[in-house]
Image (cartoon, rainbow, N blue to C red):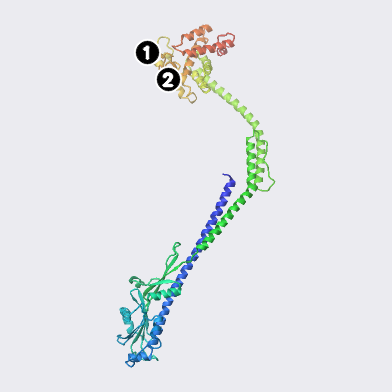
């Protein structure tokens, strides 16, 4: 992925993520505000409902006061007004304003008169209301200690709250003695609740508190349920206490929450429009980036690749006539190219000299190492001086013959070292056995045949000779399997060992000894062929003879090869 594409994708994704976050934040703020407004409206509506109930209580208290502090009522209770009627208000008016009943009690709290003003469609008898109010012993105790201002309270008849106001019956000038008590009641029936809901545009119900709630001093007065997004309604409750401060009933309201769906939809459209603008902005930014950055970087890349493909770096990159980071990079690359060209010219000559010195040291080191190994092999190998002097010649001929039959270059050096130390194991054989001129006994023969294994062990103990063991440990094996130390035969014998066996026979036939004449080519070939199939590999014998013939042709029919010729000189 190109840098331009990465920038374009990163910029676009970043802007879209920011827009999404802003959308979520603003939507969350809008919903939180709507939820808060819904809670505040619910609290306000519940307070309005409680205010209506308190207003009803105050109206009830005023009516009971008007009726109780009346001379007509006082005279009726003193048996002076047989045709008693309530002052000021008639039945229709009292029913309209919601009075359920008016009850007159004597000083012993016995009922003297009851008036039923409840609506005909939802009747509420004074007797049932009085029973409900006086079913609570605390209400009786409170009535016994009533003062001139009277008392007001609320009682529950099932799930229906009943407001009551009890006043002492006095004269219109509020003069004693008390002639009795007047109680006005107000039952909150379903019709009243429905009418109040319509006036408030707010649906509510009245539910009594249970025993646990009545005894809970920490009961909250207002509870607004958690508003959920999928629920279009808001639910809340407000507690109403009676005249003793005890929780009496709940006003539970339900109202639709603030609807923000249209605003949210418009906000979504707005953010979609902003997202489209962001995409257009990214495309415009990409075009600008392509002009001021990408095209120049692409050209720089192509010029750099062209210089890398060229054999000689002799060109330079184009430097734009701008003062920015890319131009500085172009100039730095040109400076680097010039420096590399200068250094490469100097290093070529230094490298040539270093290579010549290294090759010379390597050749001299190899020659010195081989010369040292040749001296060691010639010095420590058992045998007379003539034999030791021919060891190096034998090793060189072995290396040459192995190359002739196709052995690899690495194995040639190993064959050369193996030929040098082919008899090093003889040092481990007792001197009297090694130089015995008579026939060896069976034990002596067995011990003598172990010297190839001693040669192998010696070679493995020296790091530089460790891989050169095939010749020392196997060259005494015969083609027909009669050799030692393991009786290997034919191709089971390593080819290097078979080649060395041929060269060793050639070396024994051709090396100079005092009092012995040099053999002719015909005698040499006959002697080697005589060992074919028994001691020597037949194919290798013929290969070696052919190699000798090639040497003869090059040396004008001289039988002795150049290695032997060097030794004689």
Horizontal relation, residue 323 to residue 103: left or right: right
The quarter of the image holding the C terminus is top right
- Residue displayed at 48% across by 10% down: 528
Disc ID at residue 442: 1
Query: In the displayed image of the protein, which residue is found farthest to the right?
Result: 321
Q: Residue 383, percent across and down?
A: 48, 14
Residue at point 43% right, 9% down? 437
**Which is more N-terminal, label 1 or label 2?**
1
Rendered image quadrant of residue 221:
bottom left
Residues 112 and 143: in front is 112
Mark 2: secondary structure: helix
Picture disc at residue 263: none
Where residue 505 appears, as percent x and y from the top left, is 48, 12
Image height of 234 relative to 76, above or below: above
- From the viewer's perspective, tell me whether residue 328 is left or right of residue 233: right
Q: Quadrant of the N terminus?
A: top right
Q: CA distance from mark 2 to mark 1?
A: 18 Å
Q: From what the image shows, is residue 294 above or below residue 403?
A: below
Q: Residues within 10 Å of mark 1 (few under 14, many from 20)?
A: few
């Amino acid at each position: 992925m190109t840098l331009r594409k990465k920038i374009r994708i990163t910029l676009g994704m970043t802007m879209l993520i920011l827009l999404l976050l802003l959308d979520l934040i603003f939507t969350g703020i809008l919903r939180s505000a709507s939820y808060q407004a819904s809670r505040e409206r619910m609290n306000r509506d519940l307070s309005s409902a409680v205010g209506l109930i308190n207003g009803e209580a105050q109206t009830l208290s005023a009516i009971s006061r008007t009726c109780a502090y009346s001379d007509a009522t006082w005279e009726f209770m003193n048996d002076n007004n047989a045709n008693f009627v309530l002052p000021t208000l008639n039945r229709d008016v009292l029913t309209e304003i919601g009075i359920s009943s008016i009850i007159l009690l004597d000083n012993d709290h016995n009922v003297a008169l009851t008036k039923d003003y409840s609506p005909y469609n939802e009747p509420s008898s004074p007797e049932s209301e009085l029973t409900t109010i006086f079913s609570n012993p605390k209400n009786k105790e409170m009535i016994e200690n009533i003062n001139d201002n009277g008392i007001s309270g609320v009682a529950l008849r099932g799930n229906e709250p009943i407001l009551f106001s009890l006043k002492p019956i006095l004269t219109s000038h509020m003069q004693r003695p008390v002639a009795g008590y007047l109680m006005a009641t107000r039952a909150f029936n379903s019709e009243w609740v429905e009418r109040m809901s319509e006036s408030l545009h707010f649906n509510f119900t009245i539910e009594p508190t249970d025993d646990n709630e009545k005894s809970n001093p920490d009961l909250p007065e207002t509870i607004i349920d958690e508003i959920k997004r999928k629920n279009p309604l808001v639910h809340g409750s407000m507690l109403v206490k009676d005249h003793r401060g005890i929780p009496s009933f709940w006003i539970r309201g339900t109202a639709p929450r603030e609807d923000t769906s249209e605003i949210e939809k418009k906000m979504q459209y707005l953010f979609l429009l902003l997202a489209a603008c962001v995409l257009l902005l990214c495309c415009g930014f990409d075009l600008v980036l392509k002009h001021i950055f990408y095209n120049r970087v692409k050209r720089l890349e192509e010029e750099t690749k062209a210089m890398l493909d060229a054999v000689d770096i002799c060109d330079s990159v184009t430097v734009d006539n701008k003062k920015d980071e890319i131009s500085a990079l172009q100039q730095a690359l040109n400076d680097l190219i010039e420096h590399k060209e200068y250094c490469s010219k100097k290093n070529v000559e230094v490298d040539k000299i270093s290579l010549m010195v290294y090759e010379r040291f390597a050749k001299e080191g190899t020659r010195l190492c081989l010369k040292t190994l040749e001296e060691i092999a010639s010095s420590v190998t058992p045998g007379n001086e003539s034999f030791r002097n021919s060891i190096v010649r034998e090793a060189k001929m072995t290396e040459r013959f192995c190359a002739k039959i196709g052995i690899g270059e690495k194995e040639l050096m190993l064959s050369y070292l193996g030929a040098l130390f082919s008899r090093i194991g003889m040092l481990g054989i007792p001197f009297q056995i090694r130089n015995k001129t008579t026939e060896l006994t069976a034990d002596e023969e067995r011990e003598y045949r172990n010297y190839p294994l001693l040669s192998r062990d010696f070679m493995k103990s020296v790091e530089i000779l460790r891989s050169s063991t095939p010749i020392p440990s196997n060259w005494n094996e015969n083609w027909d399997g009669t050799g030692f130390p393991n009786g290997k035969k034919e191709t089971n014998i390593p080819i290097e060992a078979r080649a060395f066996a041929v060269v060793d026979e050639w070396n024994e036939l051709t090396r100079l000894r005092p009092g012995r004449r040099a053999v002719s080519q015909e005698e040499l070939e006959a002697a080697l062929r005589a060992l074919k199939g028994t001691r020597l590999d037949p194919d290798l014998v013929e290969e070696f003879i052919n190699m000798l013939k090639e040497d003869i042709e090059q040396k004008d029919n001289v039988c002795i090869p150049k290695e032997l010729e060097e030794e004689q000189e």
